[in-house]
Image (cartoon, rainbow, N blue to C red):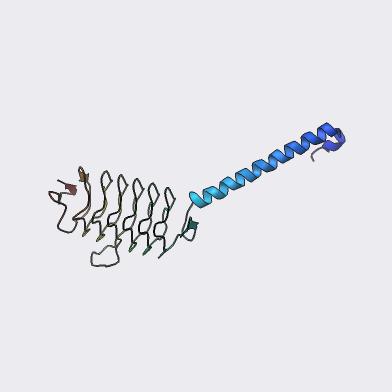
Amino acid sequence: MLPNLDVLDASPRSRRRRRTLIAAAITAVLAITGTVVAITVSGGSRSGTLVGTCDIGPSAQCPGADLRGANLASVDLGSANLRGANLSGANLTGANLQGADLTDANLGLANLTGTQFGHSTTYRTDNANLTNADLYGANLYGANLTGVTLLGANLTGANLHSANLTGAYMSTAHLYGWYSGIIGYPASPLPVSWVANNGALHN
């Protein structure tokens, strides 16, 4: 049992000191609570969560949404409208983006490890559209890009190791360097002077 401090010291000075300490404690609790809420909104985004103006989930309508740095790991954004969205630096590890429209989206430096953009078969017509998407420096390790449209997409510095590019449309994609460890063969034609062989994409 805590001692009764009023009995120990009931002087006005002591009471003022206790009131000051209590006020400081309440302020600290409110600050911590606010921080937790902020983290939940900006860094703990999950399916069914409102991030900015975007309601995260299948068939989400989020054209032009600002999702920079958002934690969208393992979310289901299948068939979502993300045209022109800013997803730079976002964590989309293991997310489902099959059928999503990412035309003109910015995915620069995003973590797309294991992200599902396409289906296991190339004849599906609901694969993701990444036309003109900025994938500069994006980590696409193990991503499924089967049958995905990458026309005009910027893949400069992107990590495509273990990514499945079977049937991907990338004739006008912007490529640079040597991409090793890829799975499958993109659809013909490839960008001028580029070839895919022995698990590598190079010029």
Looking at the image, residue 30 sits to the left or right of residue 151; the answer is right
Above or below, 167 relative to 198:
below
Residue 171 rendering spot, x and y as whole percentages: 18, 55
Residue 163 rendering spot, x and y as whole percentages: 27, 52
Residue 80 rendering spot, x and y as whole percentages: 38, 63
Above or below, 14 relative to 132:
above
Residue at image location 87% in from the left, 36% down from the top: 7
The image quadrant of residue 117 is bottom left
Residue 79 rendering spot, x and y as whole percentages: 36, 64
Q: How many marks?
A: 0
Looking at the image, residue 153 sits to the left or right of residue 36; the answer is left
Looking at the image, residue 175 sits to the left or right of residue 6; the answer is left
Looking at the image, residue 114 sits to the left or right of residue 32; the answer is left
In front here: 141 or 49? 49
Quadrant of the image for the N terminus?
A: top right
In front here: 200 or 71? 71
Quadrant of the image for the C terminus?
A: top left
In front here: 66 or 121? 66
Residue at image location 27% in from the left, 54% down from the top: 132
In front here: 139 or 102? 102
